[in-house]
Amino acid sequence: MDMYSKEEKEQALEVIASAVGRCEKIWPKFEEGASQHTLLKNRIKALYIAKALIAGEGRNEVYTKSELAQAIAPITSIIRKCEKAQGKFEEGSSHFIRFGRMIDAMEIAKAYVSFEREKR
């Protein structure tokens, strides 16, 4: 899948790695079984799958079609939440730019996961 430049993929991988780190940091603070705990668990798994696919390592990992399908929802949720949050800030502000980078990275992640799912 060569729709994206090397720079776009590298930037997406940096943003995804940062998001995974933030999620993993806060995840243990929620009680197992709580909705936030489950949401973060699903989000972390989806981001790891996307990261592997973008980095080209996903071909070695065996992700089922079901896992790939389940990864799309958390990524789509991140996109929606970032778009909503971005709308609250002035264009050009640091928050606006940060959310824009996250949206771009998640769009790339979603494209890779969707592409891999369609191949199976």
Image (cartoon, rainbow, N blue to C red):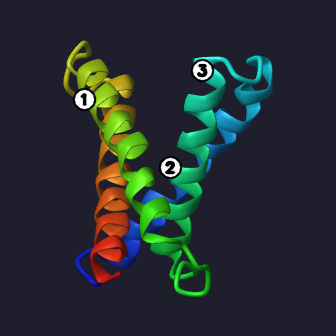
Identified by mark 2, the residue type is Val
Q: Which mark is on residue 7?
A: none
Residue at the spot of label 2: 15
Q: Earlier in the sequence, mark 1 or mark 3?
A: 3
Query: Few, some or many C-alpha atoms within 10 Å of disc 3 (few <14, some 14-19, many ≥20)?
Result: some
Q: Position of residue 75 (x, y in %)?
A: 39, 45
Q: Secondary structure at mark 2?
A: helix
Q: Secondary structure at mark 1?
A: helix
Query: Few, some or many C-alpha atoms within 10 Å of disc 1 (few <14, some 14-19, many ≥20)?
Result: some
Against 86, residue 64 (above or below) is below
The quarter holding residue 37 reads: top right
Q: Quadrant of the N terminus?
A: bottom left
Query: Few, some or many C-alpha atoms within 10 Å of disc 2 (few <14, some 14-19, many ≥20)?
Result: many
Q: Quadrant of the C terminus?
A: bottom left
CA gap between label 2 and label 3 equals 21 Å
CB within 8 Å, label 2 to label 3: no
Q: Is residue 28 left or right of residue 35?
A: right
Residue at the spot of label 3: 36
Q: Earlier in the sequence, mark 2 or mark 3?
A: 2
Q: Residue at x 19, y 25 (%)?
A: 91
Q: Nearer the viewer, mark 1 or mark 3?
A: 3
Against 7, residue 33 (above or below) is above
Q: Position of residue 42 (x, y in %)?
A: 56, 41
Residue at the spot of label 1: 83
Q: Is residue 112 visible?
A: yes
Identified by mark 1, the residue type is Glu
Q: Residue at x 58, y 79 (%)?
A: 62
CB within 8 Å, label 1 to label 2: no
